Structures are given as structure tokens and as C-alpha cells.
Amino acid sequence: QVQLVESGGGLVEPGGSIRLSCAASGNIFSINSMGWSRQAPGKQREVVGMITRSGSPNYADSVGARFRISRDDAHNTVYLEMTALTPADTAMYYCNAEVTSIRPMGDPGPTNEYWGQGTQVTVSP
């Protein structure tokens, strides 16, 4: 089994910054792409961005250059740095990862997508 746990959410003033973390743990052979999505109250979940296994990120037009995704493969962690925040960025933020599990003998098992439980970011004066 694989678990993803987000952290770092909280209350931020408009114009401020915050960094979210998401750590993967469990029976991991390798992690392919990792990403972030968000869901605001009353709205559908939207993709914020993702980062490939080689470290190439891409972002939704709605966040542009304000957000930056990075990863630390030594710690199976993906980060989301958010700057110039506005109330429109208020949402529950979720991370996801495409993970190849490890079998008991050490060889790769199936590849599945996993999601975290989310961390709340509220942008308000």
C-alpha cells in the first residue's frame, strides 16, 4: 500500500506565499509523475500542475508563474510553492502520484495513481 500525506496548509494574507509538501510512503519501487490539484467550495477539482519523473514541471494557465512545483526523490516528496496569493486561490489542495509498487522480492509491481487527503489553504486578510 502507498500513502500520500500533504502538509503546510493554513491561513495566508493576500499577496503572501506558502509552501505545501506531500510525502509518499509505503511499498514504493519508483514514483513517476507527481502533481497537485485543488478544489474550492462549490467548484470542481482543477489541476494546478504536475512534474515528471525527470523533473519537468507544467502548470495550469490559472496559476501561471505564481506557483512552482518541485520534487525531492530521495524523500519521495513533492512541493508546491505558491506566491502572490489571492482569495481565488482558497481551496483544498491535493497531491497525487503515479507510483510503481515494490513486490516482496524487490521487483516492480503494478503502477497505480494515489491521492492524498488534502490540505486547506485559505487566503484572507
Image: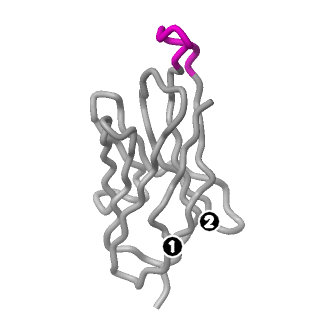
Picture residue at 28% right of the left edge, 58% below the top: 65
Q: Position of residue 113 (x, y in %)?
A: 58, 30
Marked residue nearer the N-terminal end (1 or 2): 2
Q: As displayed, is residue 109 above or below residue 95?
A: above
State the CA–CA distance, disc 1 to disc 2.
8 Å
In terms of depth relative to the viewer, which is nearer, 15 or 99? 99
> Looking at the image, which residue sits at the far right?
42
Q: Position of residue 47 (x, y in %)?
A: 52, 48
Q: Amino acid at mark 2?
A: Ala
Q: Position of residue 62 (x, y in %)?
A: 43, 58
Q: Quadrant of residue 76?
A: top left
Picture residue at 59% right of the left edge, 36% below the top: 114
Residue that mark 1 sits on: 88
Residue that mark 2 sits on: 40
Query: On the rendered image, what quadrant is the N terminus found in?
Result: top right
Q: Is residue 95 magenta?
A: no
Left or right: 93 in relation to 68: right
Magenta residue span? 102-111
Q: Quadrant of residue 71?
A: top left
Picture residue at 43% right of the left edge, 80% below the top: 12
Left or right: 30 in relation to 117: left
Q: As displayed, is residue 44 above or below residue 106?
A: below
Q: As displayed, is residue 96 above or below residue 110?
A: below
Picture residue at 53% right of the left edge, 21% below the top: 101
The answer to whether marks 1 and 2 mark residues whose Cβ atoms lie closer than 8 Å is yes
Mark 1 Cα-neighbour bin, 10 Å: few <14, some 14–19, many ≥20: few
